Image: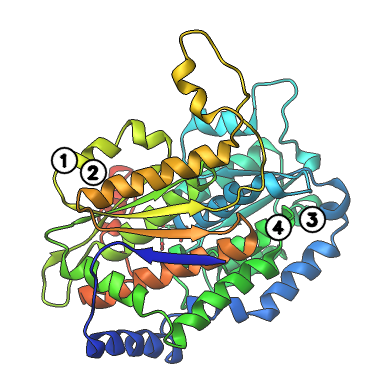
């Protein structure tokens, strides 16, 4: 269950709300934009389940999964994994190799230790790249092949690896030629909107998550939206865009450390989708900021509350952490003033801090809305993913941009190739 309360006056004209619903409906029905339909892809879910359930290696040997990918090919999976990790029964490690930073790669693989955990005989490797040519991903992939002595045509490599990519991409061609396991990303699903495709579903299912519930949550949100029950969400996007000069920054202030990577996923989705040249040739965009409560009350909150009034804030709160850990009823000399929380649950403290922060921002006229999930579970994770994806599509519609491309990131890629003397 997810609820959304608004503490700012964001009313929208009926006609504009209607046009926004219609625009997204058209994206969906024309199949120009494919992420809306991912929760209905039963065939992909079955393919993933059959693959994993029938694999001797996955069922009996696998202790680690290494995902190699970057941006939309890793952030969404990482977001859900870190949100739900504490609830899992299965003890399979899930590692992400994203950055071509040698220190980071060695650290994740625990390479220099005698008791290194990622070993050839206990690890499944998943290489994810929609384009199939991303330099960070292919470089790390090559390193892993050498490090673990995998040959493309060996049975071990086939048993212990999979590729997730677009049909027809260079990686897909490689998989076809060598008979490697391959899962396709629909052409009409962009990288940063792909977590509910095989990109997220395969590693999450292998790691022990309930992907059916994840998709059910996403479907519920999507259906509510397309049944036109979510005027608030449309109006939120409209408010952000109409007031983009006054409030150019949108903060996601999440009150649980488990949302750290979800916040990072939001930053990519929002920034890469909305920073564009609009259809009239203007540079437009909304800047995402991600904070974790209560930690960032001690760093960023001051700027929100007394600095320039140029940010909107969405507070993400968990009603019930399903954890009854208590602050001990101990009175320490000189610290008696802290006793007011003695014998209270930690979650009560964190949520009271969340409420206090919300109130303090409302009092200072910051536009705030509160997004509350009853628990951290797969259903709510799916709901939140779809919530922010649809919000992004709505903001893109009101900004009059192409939400789904990212031409700007090509500039640097071209310069990089030139620096290495490549075409
Ligand atoms: O959203 C996007 O399209 C990008 O952020 C990509 O996910 C990212 O650049 C990685 O690309 P690829 O999956 O092609 O390796």
Q: In the image, ligand 1 is in what quadrant?
A: bottom left
N-terminal of the two: label 4 or label 3?
3
Depicted 63 relative to depicted 19: above or below: above
Q: Are marks 2 and 1 in contact (CB under 8 Å)?
A: yes
Find the distance from the CA under tag 2 to the CA under tag 1: 6 Å
Tell me which label, 4 or 1, sits earlier in the chain: 4
Q: Is residue 126 left or right of residue 409?
A: right
> Which-is-in-front pick, marks 4 and 1?
1
> Who's the residue at 64% across and 28% down the image?
110
Quadrant where the N terminus lies?
bottom right
Can residue 267 be seen here? The reply is: yes
Disc nearest the viewer among 3 and 2? 2
**Up/down of 330 relative to 145, above or below:** above
Residue 382 shown left or right of residue 178 in the figure: left
For the residues carrying marks 4 and 2, which lies nearer the camera in this image? 2
Residue ID for mark 2? 304
User: Disc 4 vs disc 1: Cβ atoms closer than 8 Å?
Assistant: no
* Residue 209: assigned label: 4
Q: Disc 4 vs disc 3: Cβ atoms closer than 8 Å?
A: no
* Quarter of the figure with residue 244: bottom left
Q: CA distance from mark 4 to mark 3?
A: 21 Å
Judging by the rendered image, the residue that carries numbered circle 1 is: 307
Question: Marks 3 and 1: which is nearer the front?
Answer: 1
| Residue beneath disc 3 | 159
């Amino acid at each position: 269950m997810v609820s959304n309360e608004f503490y700012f006056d964001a009313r929208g004209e009926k006609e504009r709300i209607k046009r926004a619903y219609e625009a997204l409906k058209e994206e969906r029905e024309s199949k120009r934009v494919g992420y809306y339909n991912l929760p209905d892809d039963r065939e992909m879910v079955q393919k993933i389940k059959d693959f994993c359930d029938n694999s001797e290696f996955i069922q009996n040997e696998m202790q680690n999964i290494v995902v190699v990918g970057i941006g939309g090919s890793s952030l969404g999976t990482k977001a859900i994994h870190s949100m739900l990790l504490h609830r899992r029964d299965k003890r399979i490690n899930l590692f992400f190799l994203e950055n071509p930073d040698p220190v980071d790669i060695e650290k994740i693989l625990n390479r220099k230790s005698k008791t290194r955990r990622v070993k050839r005989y206990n690890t499944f490797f998943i290489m994810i790249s929609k384009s199939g040519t991303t330099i960070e991903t292919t470089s790390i992939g090559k390193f892993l092949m050498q490090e673990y002595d995998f040959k493309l045509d060996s049975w071990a490599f086939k048993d212990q690896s999979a590729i997730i990519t677009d049909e027809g991409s260079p990686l897909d061609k490689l998989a076809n030629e060598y008979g490697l396991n391959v899962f396709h990303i629909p052409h009409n699903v962009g990288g940063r909107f792909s977590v509910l495709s095989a990109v997220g579903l395969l590693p999450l299912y292998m790691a022990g998550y309930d992907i059916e519930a994840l998709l059910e949550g996403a479907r519920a949100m999507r259906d509510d939206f397309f049944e036109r029950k979510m005027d608030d969400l449309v109006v939120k996007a409209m408010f952000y865009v109409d007031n983009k000069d006054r409030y150019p920054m949108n903060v996601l202030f999440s009150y649980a450390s488990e949302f750290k990577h979800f916040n990072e996923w939001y930053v990519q989705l929002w920034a890469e989708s909305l920073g564009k040249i609009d259809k009239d040739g203007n540079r437009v965009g909304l800047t995402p900021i991600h904070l974790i409560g209560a930690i960032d009350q001690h760093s960023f909150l001051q700027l929100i509350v007394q600095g320039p009034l140029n940010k909107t804030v969405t507070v993400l709160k968990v009603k019930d952490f399903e954890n009854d850990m208590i602050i001990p009823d101990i009175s320490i000399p000189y610290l008696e003033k802290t006793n007011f929380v003695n014998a209270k649950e930690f979650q009560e403290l964190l949520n009271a801090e969340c409420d206090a922060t919300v109130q303090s921002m409302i009092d200072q006229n910051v536009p705030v809305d509160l997004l509350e999930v009853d628990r951290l579970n797969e259903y709510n994770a799916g709901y939140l993913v779809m919530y922010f994806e649809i919000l992004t599509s709505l903001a893109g519609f009101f900004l009059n941009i192409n939400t789904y491309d990212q031409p700007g990131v090509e500039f640097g890629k071209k310069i990089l190739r030139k620096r290495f003397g490549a075409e």
